[in-house]
Image: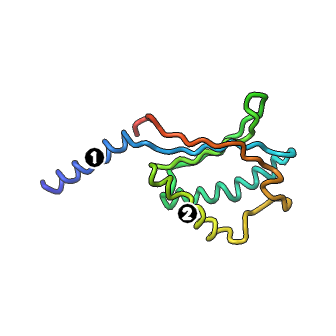
Amino acid sequence: MGNLLLVVLVLLVNTALGQNQTTITIIDFVKIKNERRQEAVFYYENNWKMYRDIALKKGFIASYKLLTTPADSIANFDLILMTEYADSLQFNLSEDRFQQIIKETRPDGPKLLNGLKPNDFRESLFFKKAKTLFRPQS
């Protein structure tokens, strides 16, 4: 009976904490330069995505997305990169964790298409850090 009570209490605490948990999302807005979309998508798929897949498996991040959008006169960017962290602690550790992942997986630098460096095909316009106010309960 005591073990069952302990399990129920742990589940209740985890549920209560999960409902009020504030996740941190980093959102990067990127402009593709010189009509080099193929190189940009290759770079993000073979580097950015790979690093996040590893981080996700290790529990360093909660989720990620790469979105495409047509640039226009109001919002002159082509890609939106989103990385979600479970909490501020996870976010605060992210730089060191990603540096370690990069060092282990691509010690000689990122995988590139046509030998073009990132500055040749993309420009990071700005980024935003956002906190979750509420989300659907799982």
Apparent side of residue 84 relative to residue 134 in the rendered image (left or right): right
**Residue 76, quarter of the rendered image:** top right
The residue under label 1 is 13
Q: Which amino acid, mark 1?
A: Val
Of residues 79 and 28, the one drawn nearer to the viewer in this rendering: 28
Name the residue at the top extreme. 74
Apparent side of residue 114 relative to residue 20 in the rendered image (left or right): right
Q: Residue at x 65, y 54 (%)?
A: 49
Q: Residue at x 71, y 39 (%)?
A: 68
25 in relation to 3, above or below: above
102 in relation to 24, above or below: below
Work out whether mark 2 precedes mark 1 in sequence or the reverse, and give the earlier one.
1
Q: Position of residue 38 (x, y in %)?
A: 81, 50
Apparent side of residue 93 relative to residue 108 in the rendered image (left or right): left
Mark 2 residue crowding within 10 angstroms, few (<14) / some (14–19) / many (20+):
few
Q: Position of residue 125 (x, y in %)?
A: 72, 43
Q: Position of residue 24 (x, y in %)?
A: 50, 45
**Looking at the rendering, in which quadrant would you find the N terminus?**
bottom left
The residue under label 2 is 96
Apparent side of residue 51 relative to residue 57 in the rendered image (left or right): right
Q: Which amino acid, mark 2?
A: Asp
State if disc 1 and disc 2 touch (CB < 8 Å).
no
Q: Position of residue 132 (x, y in %)?
A: 47, 38
131 in relation to 101, above or below: above
- Give the CA separation, mark 2 to mark 1: 30 Å
Q: Residue at x 48, y 58 (%)?
A: 59
